[in-house]
Amino acid sequence: MSLNEQQAWNAHLQTPVIFNHHAPIEVNSSTIKHVNLNPIKSTVHALDNEERVLLLTPLKDAAPYLSKYFELIAELTYPHRLIDLGFLVGDSKDDTLAVLSMELDRIQKRPDQIPFNSVVVVEKDFGTVLSQSVEDRHSFEAQGPRRKAMGRARNYLLATALKPEHSWVYWRDVDIVESPAAILEDFISHNRDILVPNIWFHRYENNQDIEGRFDYNSWIESEKGLKLAASLPKDVVLAEGYKQYDTGREYMAKMGDWRDDAHMEINLDGIGGVNILVKADVHRSGINFPCYAFENQAETEGFAKMAKRAGYEVVGLPNYVVWHIDTEEKPGNA
C-alpha cells in the first residue's frame, strides 16, 4: 500500500483491548458449600421441571394410624423419586417411633417405584403432657397450649428437613383415612402460595353416612372476630369453634360439596393443618407456625395470618374433600 492508503486504513482500524481486572476465583476448600436458590421454582409445571416436594408429618402417639398413612402415601401419583419424607416424633408414650421405623424400612426396600427419594426422622420432646384422648385434645382449655406445642413441633421439623432443592412443602397429618392419589398434582395445578382442602369425616348412623364436617380452623375472618380479638390480651390464643369465643367467622367446613367442582377456590384468613401445600419460598421467607399468640392465633391459624400479613395468598378448596378419621367429638365442639 502507498503511504496515503496506509493512512486511510489506520484511520478506520482500532485494535481491541481487553482489560481483565478480575480473574476467575477458584474455591477448593471442602468446608465451603455454594447453594444457588435461583433455579428453585414452584410452578404449575412441577412435573416437567421435576420440582422436589418435601412431605412433612409431625407425630405423637400415632402408632395406630401409621399403617393407613403409608398405604395412602404409597398411592401418591407424583413421582416418589421427587418426594422426600420428614417426620418428627415427640412426647410419645406408645410405639410410634418403632412402628414408623418398621413401616419406613418396609416401604424403602420395595423394588418398584414406591420408595421415596429420602427420609428424615427427627426426635424432639417438648414436655407436652396433654393426653391424646378426644376429650383432652379437643377440650376448650387445651386449645391454647396444644396449638402452641404443635407450632413448635412443626417449626422444628421444618427447620431440620427443608433443603435447598425443595420447591414445595406438603404438610399431611397422620390420621387421614381417604384422599385422592393425585392430590399433589391437583394442588400444584392451582399455583397458590398456600392451599388447603376441606376436611370431613365419615360417620355411619342408621346405615347412613352423615359426612361430618371436621376442620373448623379454616375460616374467613369477620368483623365480629376482629372486634373480639381487639378486646383480648395479646397473649390470648383464640380457639375456633367453641362457645367461649363467638367469632362469627365463616367456616370452610360448612361450605362445599365433594360432588361439585373440586377446583373452586375461596380466600381464607385461617387454615387447619390436616393437609397444606406451601410453596417452599413462603417458608424460606420466614413464614412459619407461631408457637405464641400472633394476632391472637397460633400454629396453622397464626401461620395463615402471618402469611397474609406478608402478602402471600391463602386459598381453600371447599369442594375438594380429604377425609379424616372420625374422632367422635363430644357435643360443645363445633
Image (spheres, helix red, strand yellow):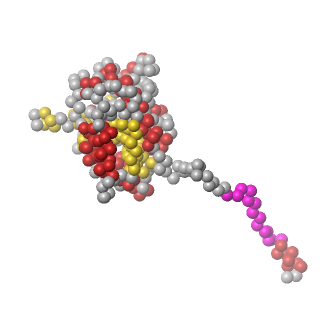
Residue 25 image-quadrant placement:
bottom right
x and y, in percent, of residue 13 in the image: 79, 71
Quarter of the image for residue 123 reads top left
x and y percentages locating residue 307 in the rendered image:
45, 35
Quarter of the C terminus within the rendering: top left
- Left or right relative to 144: residue 211: left
The residue located at (35%, 31%) in the rendering is 91
Q: Is residue 130 above or below residue 323?
A: above
Residue 13 within the magenta-colored segment of the rendering: yes
- Vertical placement of residue 27 versus 58, above or below: below
Residue 113 part of the magenta segment: no
Query: Along the horizontal axis of the image, is 332 left or right of 28?
Result: left
- Secondary structure mostly seen in the magenta stretch: loop
Is residue 151 shown above or below 103? above
Where does residue 261 sit, x and y in percent of width and height?
28, 45
What residue is shown at x 16% (from left), y 37% (from top)? Answer: 209
* Residues drawn in magenta: 11-24
Residue 287 visible from this viewpoint? yes
Direction right: furthest residue: 3
Q: Residue at x 40, y 45 (%)?
A: 120
Task: Please give the count of numbered marks on the rendered protein.
Answer: 0
Q: Quadrant of the N terminus?
A: bottom right
- Residue that extends furthest to the left in the rendered view of this protein: 206
Q: Image check: 75 left or right of 205?
A: right
Question: Looking at the image, which is closer to me, 46 or 256?
Answer: 46
Give the residue at x 30% y 55%. Answer: 110
Q: Is residue 76 visible?
A: no
The answer to which of 125 and 251 lies nearer the viewer is 125
Of residue 266 and residue 77, the one placed in the foreground of this image is 77
